[in-house]
Image (cartoon, rainbow, N blue to C red):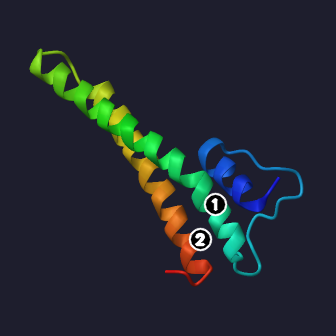
Amino acid sequence: MPRALAIIRHLLFGQRSVGTPRCATKPPTVPAIDTLLKAARPHIAIAESLVVKQRLLVDALKRDGHPTADAERLLATMQGILALMRTHVVRELRKASLL
């Protein structure tokens, strides 16, 4: 499995391929970064749309007078995951000296 895909799978699902190093000893190459970005973009876009939908659901629950604590906790978790995804991409770009 390409390293970039392994990184994305680890971040999104906590999966590691056998033999995948826990940390890179040298900066990722430009092709590896390109692969990472191609894989990350659709995942980030999906996460962004899910956060927007959840925010709308929380607003609708509030408007209708329903309890929102659970929905708000889920929204906060989703926002945290999205932030982690973005942070990871930035970190990989910095490692490759592209940012």
Q: Which residue is mark 1?
A: 36
Percent x, y of residue 98: 54, 81
Residue 59, above or below 64 = below
Residue 92 bears which disc, if any?
2
Nearer to us of marks 1 and 2 is 1
Residue that appears at 60% across and 56% down: 38
Percent x, y of residue 1: 83, 52
Residue that appears at 38% across and 44% down: 48
Would you say 68 lies left or right of 46 here? Answer: left
Residue that appears at 88% across and 51% down: 18
Question: Quadrant of residue 47 in the image?
Answer: top left
Would you say 18 lies left or right of 91 here? Answer: right
- The residue lying toward the viewer, choosing from 10 and 46, is 46
Residue 56, above or below 41 = above
Q: Secondary structure at mark 2?
A: helix
Q: Amino acid at mark 1?
A: Leu
Whether the residues at callouts 1 and 2 have beta carbons within 8 Å, the answer is yes
Percent x, y of residue 28: 70, 75
Instruction: First in sequence, mark 1 or 2: give its number.
Output: 1
Q: Secondary structure at mark 1?
A: helix
Percent x, y of residue 85: 50, 55
